[in-house]
């Protein structure tokens, strides 16, 4: 992180503000997430199945809502205001999580009133992320002219902020929650978010107008049924809180709305691009949609980390290091750890290559990222088949290393590409679609994880089955990744980099 901060010195000061605000937001998000399943199974005595179901519904909804938050920011409120509202909703949500009530004893059912407060807390958090996540990322893009070579590097540093938050949040909120009591862990997440909100509000002057609506006065003067856009957004948010509060308890319903929502969002974006944009702007949106679609595959495989890979590490890996048997969950922090150290190197590398005209294009980076993801699985399959009983732990280090370098080739680069490819009045929407696709990836990830496990409780852990699935998805990723590299000139053509004009200075 220190190297990352050192590198930020070559960037606008606003990047500091967004780096720290997002770091605290992710601190609260991942801190709370680290505790969630444990809290459900140990405090409310949910079965594992029910707990995973709720976890799936929650993590999917969290990535569906940014598309609405992004759209509202583009059209009616500007990103800065949306981020501030999102952060405030998150503080309330994390605060409500600290209301834990009596723990359930065996044979009892949970107190419905407390459970309903808990669902409401989740709804506040989901809406908070919905207002915040896509918009804060869009704001990073607004700090740079469209042709600025520092853009991919800037997003890579921002990504280090994300992962510093996730690393520390999971560690501290997890520790406090499990050792001293749930409410302290959740409470710490809330305090983290409050710090993020304060940094963001105080840092406004350094943002130099990023995230402000250009036609704010005109928009504010509009009336719909006598109500101002702001008023309508507040009323809509209250209604949405109720809807999400009801939806989050049912994974089936969330899965059922996910694909139709994706379809509608894609169709709307294509419609706007065709009807409202110039041919080059329209092509750029098509390029963005192709890149967005690859996200589903990427996260579906990458997110095995928390589920099937975690269990594989627990069951089939020799985790003894320096005479100590390291618990499987510890390996969960490897990804964030690698990013904190490798991110600044990558940020520097992209700028180094760009200055020498040697930087791979965004679609090439995407393809190579997906190849690395696939190679990670293949290396593990190779290690597991090397004739030993338990897989040597080095292969777990290796798979997470390849997954992290793959992630650095794709995820921050993708955020950067989204901000470059969208016209200013669509950037929140496109960024929202980006997260929506990663939400779909998370949903598919849980289905792949289910394919690696047996349905019956008493059945033994089946290493061959897991390896069969990993080898298949590994090869698929390598093939898709190379395929993407092959068609990258076409996607790159659609990006019309030569005619990309800088926005008006802020
Ligand atoms: N880990 C990153 C974050 O939390 C990326 C998440 C995603 O795109 N699904 O922001």
Image (cartoon, rainbow, N blue to C red):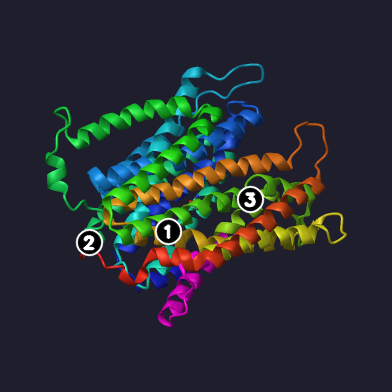
Let me know if residue 196 appears in the view.
no
Q: Residue 388 at what x, y percent from top left?
A: 87, 58
Give yes or no for contact between labels 3 and 1 (Cβ–Cβ under 8 Å): no
* Magenta segment includes 488: no
* Residue at 40 percent of width and 63 percent of height: 494
Helix, strand, or loop for circle 3?
loop
Q: Main secondary structure of the magenta part?
A: helix
> Which quarter of the figure has residue 9?
bottom left
* Residue at 31 percent of width and 47 percent of height: 272
Helix, strand, or loop for circle 2?
loop
Image mark count: 3
Give yes or no for contact between labels 2 and 1 (Cβ–Cβ under 8 Å): no
Q: Residue 243 at what x, y percent from top left?
A: 40, 26
Is residue 188 left or right of 222 when viewed as pictured? right
Which residue position is annotated with label 3? 305
Q: How far is mark 2 from mark 1, CA to CA?
A: 30 Å
Helix, strand, or loop for circle 1?
helix
Which residue position is annotated with label 1? 287
- Magenta stretch bounds: 337-365
Which is nearer the eye, 19 or 267?
267
Q: How far is mark 2 from mark 3, CA to CA?
A: 39 Å
Q: Residue 119 at what x, y percent from top left?
A: 46, 28
Let me know if residue 79 appears in the view.
yes
* Residue at 65 percent of width and 27 percent of height: 47
Label 3 beta carbon within 8 A of ligand 1: no
N-term-proximal mark, 3 vs 1? 1
């Amino acid at each position: 992180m220190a190297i990352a901060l050192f590198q930020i010195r070559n960037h606008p000061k606003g990047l500091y503000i967004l780096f720290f605000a997002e770091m605290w937001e992710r601190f609260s998000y991942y801190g709370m997430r680290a505790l969630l399943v444990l809290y459900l199974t140990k405090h409310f005595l949910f079965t594992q199945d029910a707990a995973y179901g709720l976890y799936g519904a929650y993590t999917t909804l969290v990535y569906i809502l940014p598309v609405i938050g992004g759209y509202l920011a583009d059209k009616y409120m500007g990103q800065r205001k949306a981020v501030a509202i999102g952060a405030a909703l998150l503080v309330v949500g994390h605060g409500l999580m600290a209301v834990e009530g009596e723990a359930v004893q065996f044979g009892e059912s949970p107190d419905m009133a407390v459970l309903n407060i808990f669902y409401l807390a989740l709804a506040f958090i989901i809406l908070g992320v919905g207002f915040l996540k896509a918009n804060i990322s869009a704001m990073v893009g607004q700090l740079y002219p469209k042709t600025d070579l520092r853009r991919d590097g800037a997003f890579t540093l921002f990504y280090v902020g994300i992962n510093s938050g996730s690393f520390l949040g999971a560690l501290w909120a997890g520790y406090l929650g499990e050792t001293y009591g749930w409410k302290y862990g959740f409470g710490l997440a809330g305090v983290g978010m409050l710090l993020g909100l304060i940094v963001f509000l105080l840092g406004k002057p350094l943002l130099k107008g990023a995230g402000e609506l250009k036609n704010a006065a005109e928009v504010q003067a509009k009336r719909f049924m006598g109500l101002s856009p702001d008023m309508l957004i507040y009323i809509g948010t209250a209604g949405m809180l109720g809807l999400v509060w009801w939806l989050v308890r049912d994974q089936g319903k969330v899965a059922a709305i996910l694909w139709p929502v994706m379809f509608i969002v894609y169709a709307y974006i294509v419609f706007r691009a065709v009807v409202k944009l110039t041919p080059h702007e329209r092509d750029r949106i098509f390029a963005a949609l192709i890149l967005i679609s690859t996200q589903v595959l990427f996260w579906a495989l990458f997110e095995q980390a928390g589920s099937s890979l975690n269990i594989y590490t627990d069951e089939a890996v020799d985790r003894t290091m320096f005479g100590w048997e390291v618990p499987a969950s510890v390996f969960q922090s490897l990804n964030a750890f690698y990013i904190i150290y490798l991110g600044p190197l990558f940020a520097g590398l992209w700028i180094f290559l760009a200055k020498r005209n040697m930087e791979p294009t965004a679609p090439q980076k995407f393809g190579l990222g997906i190849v690395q993801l696939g190679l990670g699985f293949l290396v593990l399959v190779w290690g597991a088949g090397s004739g030993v009983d338990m897989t040597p732990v080095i292969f777990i280090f290796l798979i997470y290393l390849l997954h992290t370098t793959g992630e650095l080739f794709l995820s921050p680069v993708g955020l950067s590409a989204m901000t470059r490819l969208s016209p200013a009045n669509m950037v929140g929407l496109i960024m929202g679609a980006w997260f929506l696709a990663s939400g779909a990836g998370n949903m598919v990830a849980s289905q792949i994880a289910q394919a690696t496990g047996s349905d019956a409780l008493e059945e033994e852990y089946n290493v061959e089955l897991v390896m069969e699935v990993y080898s298949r998805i590994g090869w698929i990723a390598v093939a898709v990744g190379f395929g993407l590299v092959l068609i990258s000139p076409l996607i790159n053509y659609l990006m019309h980099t030569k005619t990309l004009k800088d926005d008006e200075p802020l």
